[in-house]
Image (cartoon, grey):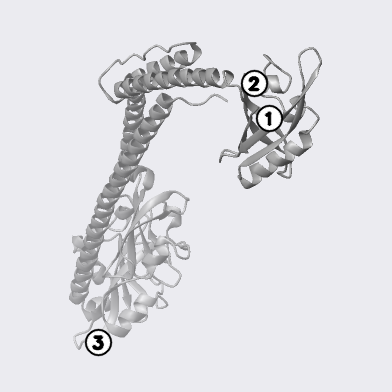
Amino acid sequence: MQTISIKLKAALATTGLSLAFIAVATVLVLNEMRTGLREVMTGQQSALVTQTADEIDERLHQDLEIVSRVAATITQAQMRAAPALRAHLEGLPTLSLMFDDVVVMDRDGQVIADVPQLPGRVGVNAADRPYFRQIMATGIAIVSEPVLGKRRRQPTVNLGAAIRAADGSIIGVLTGVLRLEKHNLLGAIADAYPGLSGYLFVITRDPQPVYVAHRDKIRILTAAAPAAGGAIARALRGFEGTLEDTDADGVPAMFSFRALRVTNWVLVSVLPVAEAFGPIQAAERTVIGLAGLLAAIAVASAWLVMYGLLAPLTHLHAAIRQMRRREGVAAALPVRRPDEIGEVAAKINLLVDARADAERRERQSAARFRAAADSSIDAFFMLDAMRDADGRIVDFMFRFANAEAAALVGRPGMPVEGRRLSEVWPLHGREALLEHYVRTMETAAPLDLEFEFRAPQVGGARRSTRRRWPAWAPPRARCGSSGRR
């Protein structure tokens, strides 16, 4: 298996750190951008819906004031004479500018006059309308709930005020009608577009809320049916502000809510997330592109820098491998530059020189030892213990034997090192001597014994002699022995 070079490791590590740093920086920058834009958009949407709601409240309050003032100008005599009452209303052009229809009902809820005149509307009874009953009971001008007109069957909202007699008793109700499908105060809300694709709508805060105004006219007076726990459901419970949710079509959007003060409605502003965060998404693509470019530059730079910094180390490695393949004296490594790598090369040169000198001295020492041992008249050898699987010594191997020892075992001039004791030792006395050597190895106690030794001589003759055999076991688990004449 091929190992990875340190240059490649360093380049990969540097590249990985650079990419990690760029990735973390990019994530932090994008997160900061998203957070900042979200705060800006939330503030803008909340400000927009608050301003719009305040304007609607102000307009509704002004319209109620005007309806109340006009109602105060209607007399009992006009209430008894429909033509005179109609002429009085037609003489107030402000009403026609503010409302789509103006209707007067007597105390029983029956329409007695209308402007403009609609065939069949006079005589219609609206006593069942909750707003009519409330005005008759309290005398307070109010904005009605959205309802379907009894005559035209169109969705409307009525602004009603009490008509009083001279004694203060309520004798009828004046109503200004806003048709929710027309471009009036409420209809204009649905025509407003926050941003390019956003929209506004109004819903009631009743137990079963309905749409009062919406860009999709079909939804007016239909149930809003907010999802439990959704943004609209929270607004119906009193929340005011901006939340992210999905609209009725499943589109992720920012919802901003503001409750109206004049009536029990909620104004809602909807801005799709795709548009709200469109600028940040474009900025994200730019930032990610720049981060990718920086990452590519960082990778290329890391490789070039690592290649330049570690090139001397590569040359040093190649020189060391070439040194290992050479035989004899190793050439000095090149010291290319005065830095840590150059210092390592110089230290290696010193180490190689020291090692070569030590090997030379060791060879000289071994040669002197061999010359001295071979010139001795005593047989001298060193043995290594050989053990079986249970750790018991079963034999010995010759590690060193001088010339006299080789001659002693009948192998003059022949190599003995590396051979077993049982292979080269004469059979006579082998077991006894092996037993003594084992004891010496196990106890580390010196051995000094004398016994008769018979060894074959050159030409096949045998010679018999008595020899004294001192032996000892040094800590390296090796047995040394010598034979003396």
Reading the chain from its start, which is encountered first: label 2 or label 3?
3
Badge 3 crowding class, 10 Å Cα cut-off, few under 14, some 14 to 19, many 20 or more, is few
Residue at (33% x, 75% y) in the render: 105
User: Mark 2 or mark 3: which is in front?
Assistant: 2
Q: Is mark 2 on a helix, strand or loop?
A: helix
Q: Which amino acid does label 1 sit on?
A: Met
Disc 1 and disc 3 in contact, CB within 8 angstroms: no
Mark 2 → mark 1, Cα distance in angstroms: 17 Å
Residue 451 in picture, x, y percent from top left: 73, 35
- Image height of 440 relative to 100, above or below: above
Question: Which numbered disc flags the more N-terminal residue, 2 or 1?
Answer: 1
Residue 169 badge = 3
Q: Report x, y in % for residue 176.
A: 28, 66
Q: Which mark is residue 404?
A: 2
Q: Which residue is drawn at 23% across and 79% down?
A: 77
Name which of mark 1 and mark 3 comes first in the sequence: 3
Q: Which mark is residue 225?
A: none
Q: What residue type is labelled 2?
A: Glu
Question: Camera-side residue: 270 or 113?
Answer: 270
Element class at badge 1: strand
Q: Is residue 394 visible?
A: no
Label annotation for residue 397: 1
352, 459: nearer the viewer:
459
**Is 90 placed above or below 401 here?**
below
Give SS at disc 3. Answer: loop
Q: How far apart are marks 2 and 3 (CA)?
A: 152 Å
Residue 331, percent from left and from top? 39, 11
238 is higher (above) or lower (below) than 303: below
- In 3D space, how far apart are the residues under numbered discs 1 and 3 (Cα atoms)? 137 Å
